[in-house]
Image (cartoon, rainbow, N blue to C red):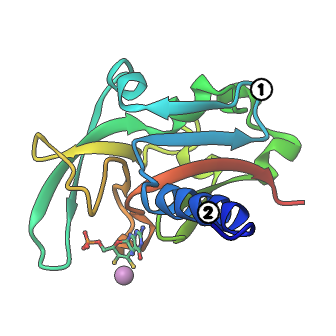
Amino acid sequence: MKPYIIPKLILSFLLICSFSRTFAQTTDAVKISGVLTKPYTLTSADLAKMPRVKVSRKDGDSTNYEYSGVLLSTVLAKGGVTLGKDLRRENLTKYVIIEAIDGYQVVFSLAELDADFTDEKIILADTVDNEPLLSTEGPFRIIVENDKRAARCIKQVTSIKIEFAK
Ligand SMILES: Nc1nc2c(c(=O)[nH]1)N[C@H]1C(S)=C(S)[C@@H](COP(=O)(O)O)O[C@H]1N2
Ligand SMILES: [Mo]
């Protein structure tokens, strides 16, 4: 056996490991991070314990779908994000940036999803018409009740981050 075969084997092994990690990346949990007091990783089990909300949305073919999940504000409140009476002054310059497995990102300002400011429902959905979301869409998708276009209804969400705009 040639002497350099061992380091070569180790290198190949490490490369295979890192590749399989990349491809095994899943979306079964959402990382909640940024400017908040209690960052956490949200699982399906966590979501199941929170109050549920239903939102109907039409897709491109005008078919109506009933999504269900948890208000994004509820998910954020669990992490200690400044909402309700704490959403004032410089906290009004905070925004939520949501990212998906394909790198797609969308942004909401905190006031856009706070019940003290608006009745608009923005949910982190995990079911559609009472069935779990398909893997191409879920397990978690943001559904914005009244946006005319579905572009912010981001599929396969992997992370939700709160940041200051300045
Ligand atoms: N992760 C992810 N979510 C996404 C997109 C995307 O490219 N990646 N496209 C958005 C756009 S532009 C639209 S119009 C809708 C399409 O959703 P539909 O396939 O359910 O009609 O998904 C939105 N969510
Ligand atoms: Mo779109």
Disc 2 Cβ-to-ligand 1 distance below 8 Å = no
Look at discs 2 and 1 and give the one toward the viewer.
Answer: 2
The residue most toward the front is 1
Quarter of the image where one finds residue 79: top right
* SS at badge 1: loop
Mark closest to the chain's N terminus, 2 or 1: 2
Q: How crowded is mark 1: few (under 14 residues within 10 Å), some or many (20 or more)?
A: few
> Left or right: where does residue 18 sit relative to residue 89?
left
Is residue 131 depicted above or below 155 in this figure? above
Report x, y in % for residue 88. Answer: 79, 39
Q: Please state which amino acid type lies under the numbered disc 2.
A: Leu
In the picture of the structure, the residue carrying the numbered disc 1 is 37
Question: Which residue sits at x=42%, y=23%?
Answer: 46
- Nearest to the observer: residue 47 or residue 55: 47
Q: CB of mark 2 within 8 Å of CB of mark 1?
A: no
**Quarter of the image where ligand 2 sits:** bottom left
- Nearest to the observer: residue 21 or residue 143: 21
Q: Can residue 115 be seen in this view?
A: no
Marker disc for residue 9: 2
> Left or right: where does residue 152 sit relative to residue 79?
left
Q: Please state which amino acid type lies under the numbered disc 1.
A: Thr
Quarter of the image where one finds residue 132: top left
- Nearest to the observer: residue 99 or residue 63: 99
Report x, y in % for residue 91. Answer: 81, 42
